[in-house]
Amino acid sequence: MLRLMPQPGSFKVASRHRSFETSLDPAVQGRLRVKRTVESLREEIRDEATTVRARRIFERPRELFRLEIQNPDMGYQRTTLLDRETLDALCSEDAVRCQLDPHLNPTD
């Protein structure tokens, strides 16, 4: 009997309960999405081989930062746009704060 390969992206166990989240208020959904993004960024930044750069790209009407994460050994690069509040939340952990450029350290 010939066995077919499963479709990409069809996993038996989801990482989160999506049907529950769709019943939430859109503002709550947004906060949960930001929380997941910040946790994902923290995990990547903790890696010692990772190079992290943050640059302010807009000051007005809202302060925005471009966060660039690179791991040359793995050929990996990630770019994320963050506002000041989210960058502050990301830098609440010492290991993450040490990796960021000193002139953009939001706790100064």
Image: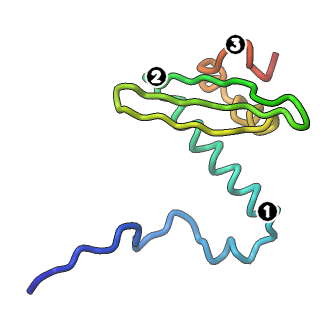
What residue lies at 37% left-to-right and 32% top-to-bottom? Answer: 75
Furthest residue in direction bottom, as rendered: 1
Find the distance from the CA under tag 3 to the CA under tag 1. Answer: 32 Å
Q: What is the three-letter code of the residue carrying label 2?
A: Glu
> Which residue has dot 3 on it?
102
Q: What is the three-letter code of the residue carrying label 1?
A: Val
Instruction: Compare marks 2 and 1 and give the one earlier in the sequence.
Output: 1
Whether the residues at callouts 3 and 2 have beta carbons within 8 Å, the answer is: no
- Indicate the position of residue 46 as horizontal and vertical percent values: 52, 29
What residue lies at 63% left-to-right and 31% top-to-bottom? Answer: 67
Query: Dot 1, how many residues are within 10 Å of its Cα: few (below 14), some (14-19), or many (20+)?
Result: few
Tell which of 4 and 56 is nearer to you: 56
The secondary structure type at the circle numbered 2 is loop
Find the distance from the CA under tag 3 to the CA under tag 2. Answer: 17 Å
The secondary structure type at the circle numbered 1 is helix
> Which residue has dot 2 on it?
48
